[in-house]
Amino acid sequence: MTNPTLHPGTIALLKDLEQVLSDFDIDFYLVGAIARDFWLSADENSVSKRKTDDVDIALMINDTGQYAQVRQALFDTGRFTPHPMEAITVIYEQAIEIDLLPFGGIEGEDRVITFTEPSLFVINMPGFAELYPYALNIGLSDELDLKICTLEGIILLKLIANDDRPQRTHDIEDIEHMLKVYFDLFSDVIYNEHFDTMSLYDTKERAYIPLVCARVVGRKIKEILAGAPALKARMITILQKRPTALWAAMLDGLMDA
């Protein structure tokens, strides 16, 4: 087991991004595949089987005007350029796509964000505001400390993404992989904070360890959604739709007292 890390090229990208965002006093955290791969990098046996070069950044933004100003400031550096098709995506050094995912004051009623530039479009970012307080501040280099979404938070977002677009079967694959390797990465958390889960399942069960991990992840998601009853209700419905042992264990964790 080693300390999780990111590729040096990705760290350089994040330094350039952070310099611009700090000028606007905008806080942000890493989500998506980059956050997933960061946590899984701690164990060579846990590394995700599915790689992506995309970078997802959750930005705490006041309004669409500020979002437009941030994008323009990124373009002014000369290192970031607009994506030809996607309005919330920029391209770093003509090579890496970065999705700038806004949340916070920019969200309107029902968490909807409406943009009018460069054309009219609407997005919804459920879970991002709830995950923000739980993002962990990590020192990635001597000059760069960034917040990164927890592995439980990544699972939450993937559950929502798959529910929105069931054709995204890779989300299910990612979730199941993370549950299978969770113990190797966070056994200390299970032993110290959720030791009771070790006696909730039959040790002879082939999926004993993943079931324990799923239960713990469900409890972590419950904590994250403590102040979001509507999203918690949706999560219960999502987990009920897939009647497998792992999903049931996550649901039990979500419902634990």
Image (spheres, rainbow, N blue to C red):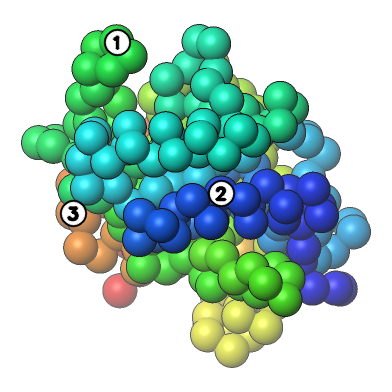
Q: Residue at x 22, y 48 (%)?
A: 62
Task: Tell which circle, 2 or 3, labels the residue nearer the N-terminal end.
Answer: 2
Q: Residues within 10 Å of mark 2 (few under 14, many from 20)?
A: some
Q: Which residue is mark 1?
A: 119
Q: CA–CA distance between discs 2 and 3?
A: 34 Å
Task: Tell which circle, 2 or 1, labels the residue nearer the N-terminal end.
Answer: 2
Q: Residue at x 62, y 50 (%)?
A: 16
Quadrant containing the C terminus is bottom left
Q: Residues within 10 Å of mark 3 (few under 14, many from 20)?
A: few
Q: Residue at x 52, y 85 (%)?
A: 193
Can you tell which of label 1 and label 3 is closer to the viewer?
A: 1
Residue 245 horizontal/vertical position (percent):
57, 47
Residue 96 horizontal/vertical position (percent):
69, 31
Residue 81 horizontal/vertical position (percent):
57, 25
Mark 2 lies on a secondary structure that is helix
Q: Residue furthest left?
A: 109
Q: Which residue is mark 2?
A: 17
Q: 87 or 71: nearer the eye? A: 71
Determine contact: label 2, label 3, CB under 8 Å: no
Q: Residues within 10 Å of mark 1 (few under 14, many from 20)?
A: few
Q: CA–CA distance between discs 2 and 1?
A: 24 Å
Residue 202 in view in this figure: no
User: In the shown orientation, is residue 50 left or right of residue 101?
Assistant: right
Residue 144 in view in this figure: yes
Q: Which residue is mark 3?
A: 229
Residue 209 horizontal/vertical position (percent):
71, 64
Check the image and report above or below for 212 versus 63: below
Quadrant containing the N terminus is bottom right
Mark 3 lies on a secondary structure that is helix
The amino acid type of the residue labelled 1 equals: Ser
The amino acid type of the residue labelled 2 equals: Leu
Can you tell which of label 2 and label 3 is closer to the viewer?
A: 2
